[in-house]
Image: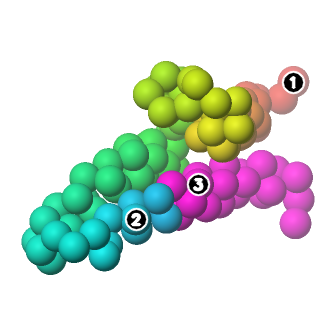
Amino acid sequence: MTTRKILHWAPRVTGVLYAVFISLFALDVWGTGASFWEELAAFLIHLLPVYLILIALFVGWWNSWLGGILFIFLATLFSLLFGWRDPVTLLLLALPPTVTGLLFMADGCISKAELRPRM
């Protein structure tokens, strides 16, 4: 596999893995003793960060630069909302989308460089 292909697929794979990782935190709502519908509503609400990640991933799949900006925005948002008190939480929540965003931007740079005519 060439470096170009690795750089193309790395942000997409890391974005999917990050969405799966964050979705695991939503599983804590099951078994709380509430009714099924209340637990389902809580589960769907706990998945809101995952919805944002999937939207950024979808956008990044078609427009690498915009996807990179969205992932870095999500990293900033998650760190401000959830992880600003604890450094470990900050790293777990903000580092993966930051890396994913930078990888999307690098993919966008490589794609634009390949589109330029050679002299």
Up-down relation of residue 9 to residue 89 (above or below): below
**Which mark identifies residue 18?**
3
Along the line of sight, the residue nearer the viewer: 86 or 74:
86
Rendered residue at 66%/43% (across/down): 92
Up-down relation of residue 3 to residue 118 (above or below): below
Q: CA distance from mark 1 to mark 3?
A: 41 Å
Instruction: Please state the horizontal and vertical placement of residue 70, each as a whole percent of the image.
Output: 48, 31
Residue ID for mark 2: 28
In the displayed structure, does residue 20 sit left or right of residue 97? left
Q: For numbered disc 1, what is the local secondary structure? A: loop
Residue ID for mark 1: 119
Q: CA distance from mark 3 to mark 2?
A: 18 Å
Q: Residues within 10 Å of mark 3 (few under 14, many from 20)?
A: some
Instruction: Please state the horizontal and vertical placement of residue 17, each as a whole percent of the image.
Output: 61, 61
Instruction: Please state the horizontal and vertical placement of residue 119, each as a whole percent of the image.
Output: 87, 24
Question: Does residue 98 appear in the picture of this structure?
Answer: no
Q: Residues within 10 Å of mark 1 (few under 14, many from 20)?
A: few
Q: Which residues are magenta?
A: 1-22
In the displayed structure, does residue 83 sit left or right of residue 31? right
- The type of residue carrying mark 1 is Met
